[in-house]
Amino acid sequence: MSGNTIVQVGSVGVETYGAHRFEGRVAVVTGAARGIGEAVARRLIAEGATVYALDLRAELLAETWAGVERAVPVPTDVADSAAVDAAFERVRAEHGVLHHLVAAAGIPDAPKRAGDFPGDPDLSTIDDESWDLVIRVNLTGTFYCLRAAVPLIQANGPAGGSIVTLSSVGALYPYPLAAAYPASKGGIIGLTRAVAALVAPDNIRVNAIAPAATDTKMLPEDKEHLAELTRLQLFDKVVPASEMAANIVYLLSDEAAFMTAQTVSVSGGMVANGG
């Protein structure tokens, strides 16, 4: 069943399989200029949501969402708490409530160490500034977004809402990545569980997803290195961002109403959920 339920979102056709699970709902997606964040935002819009698309890269964000109905691009640095609060205040001012958050913004390493992901894992090469930047963007930035989003979702009353954070299979599988990245993604798992327990009485669900090899700019450019990573999966392939987005959007949806505080490994069998 494919190809007959394509919804056009800007210049991109999005397969929805006929689903309209988010009609009239408001979502915030971070890291929405490209990659998994962009794919999630497009799928939510295709299924009826209004999406506030947050990303640090203002020009790219504007280019990605130009002319797309129900997309609201908001240039935001998630590592800046004041900027995050301002973005969510705009949601409150324009809609009063929020139904969904996907915290997908993240970096694999500090730009000054930028080489082919996953970077040099030797601990002696990771300076304080590089470590702090990755933790601040990936983990602290996710915290800032959760802190700002929860009161807006609580404003829905008993209807509640849902949140998905982006961890990584790198936080679950012992592979020699540059340590700040898996540390930040492991921290997101702990953060997700703590917040899920806190907001469960408000009927707010909070889950993490841990992707493996997904077709984004974060993949290694070195083909041999990429092959080494995908061979760790039972399915030796790279998945499109739209496929990872489908898993995230399922976790957001009412179909996953009994799922919270979970870390879902979408990794082609590289890591078994519950194992």
Image: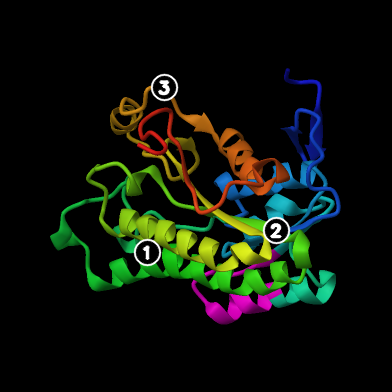
Range shown magenta: 74-88
Q: Residue at x 64, y 46 (%)?
A: 40
Instruction: Give me the C-alpha separation between circle 1 and circle 3.
Output: 29 Å
**Viewer-proximal residue, 10 or 204?**
204
Mark positioned earlier in the residue sequence (2 or 1): 1
Q: Residue at x 73, y 53 (%)?
A: 65
* Residue 142 vertical position relative to residue 40 in the rendered view, above or below: below
Reading the image, the residue beneath label 1 is 134
The C terminus, quarter of image? top left
Reading the image, the residue beneath label 2 is 161
Residue 252 coordinates in the image, percent (x, y)? 66, 48
Using the image, tell me which numbered label, if any, was put on residue 235.
3
* Residue 270 vertical position relative to residue 153 in the rendered view, above or below: above
Mark positioned earlier in the residue sequence (1 or 3): 1
Q: Residue at x 74, y 65 (%)?
A: 98
**Viewer-proximal residue, 254 or 201?**
201
Between tags 2 and 1, which lies in front? 2
Using the image, tell me which numbered label, if any, was put on residue 37.
none
The three-letter amino acid code for the residue at tag 1 is Val
